[in-house]
Image: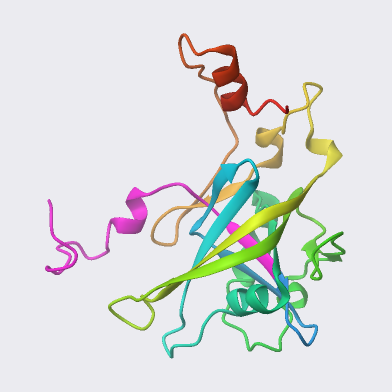
Amino acid sequence: MNYAPLLEKCPLPFSPFKSCTVPRPIGWLSTISESGVANLAPYSQWQNLTFDPPMVMFAANQYPDGRRKDTVTNAEKTGWFVWNMATYALREAVNISAMALPAGEDEFLKAGVTKAACIDAPGPRVAESPCHFECRYLSTHRLPGRSTVGTVDIVFGEVARIHVDDRFITEQGKLNIPAIRPIARMGYYDYTVVSETFEMRIPQASEAEADGLEGRAG
């Protein structure tokens, strides 16, 4: 099976596009409006960009009526957004926070999660989440789609502060990912959970290359 998505109708009942780029880390993002209303929403187009300095991005499609997502407008107006790690234990809260609620409604309350104060960012983070990035907003790159909902805002940020729950740090100083059990987005209505990891080291890598790949702190 093959088809040209810009020219032809998908021959399958469900598009395979989102089910090929998997698993996708979830950008569970919290922001605050200029009027002080907290917002919390998950985005499956989320990724690290570079590490020196650490930078991230997320992509937010418009609503069908052309409105931009509150996360985008809040980040642009306040200069900050916060990433909260989505875990299996928090999966129901993540799903509830995906609801399209009015701009004045607080998703923290709707999802039943606790606000924790940030150090740099003006908005809250999810207290129950084990890891957080406080991100300083850098810019938005807007790409027009072939439909209103296909138009996307790509938001870039610099990680100004990192929080990690001490309970999930190993004696070697690494994150215990199987204990955290992060969830990731698949296609359709499907998700997956990270409960097992394995290690591979690149043959003949230099010491500097190995340190960079392992993420050894300078």
Residue 46 point in image, percent of width and height: 53, 56
Residue that extends furthest to the top in the rendered view of this protein: 204
Q: Quadrant of residue 124?
A: bottom right
In the image: residue 173, left or right of residue 15: right
Question: Which residue occupies the foreground of this view, 2 or 208?
Answer: 208
In the image: residue 97, left or right of residue 171: left
Question: Which residue occupies the foreground of this view, 131 or 35?
Answer: 35
Q: Quadrant of residue 73?
A: bottom right
Residue 204 point in image, percent of width and height: 47, 8
Colouring convention used in this rendered image of the protein: rainbow
* Placement of the C terminus among the 4 image quadrants: top right
Which residue occupies 70% across, 56% down? 84
Point out the stretch of residues depicted in magenta: 1-30
Which residue occupies 44% across, 53% down? 186
Residue 27 point in image, percent of width and height: 59, 58
Is 12 covered by the magenta stretch? yes
Which residue occupies 39% across, 57% down? 187
Residue 157 point in image, percent of width and height: 62, 59
Q: Is residue 32 above or below residue 214?
A: below
Q: Is residue 95 above or below residue 193?
A: below
Secondary structure mostly seen in the magenta stretch: loop
The mark tally for this picture is 0
Is 4 covered by the magenta stretch? yes
Q: Quadrant of residue 8?
A: bottom left
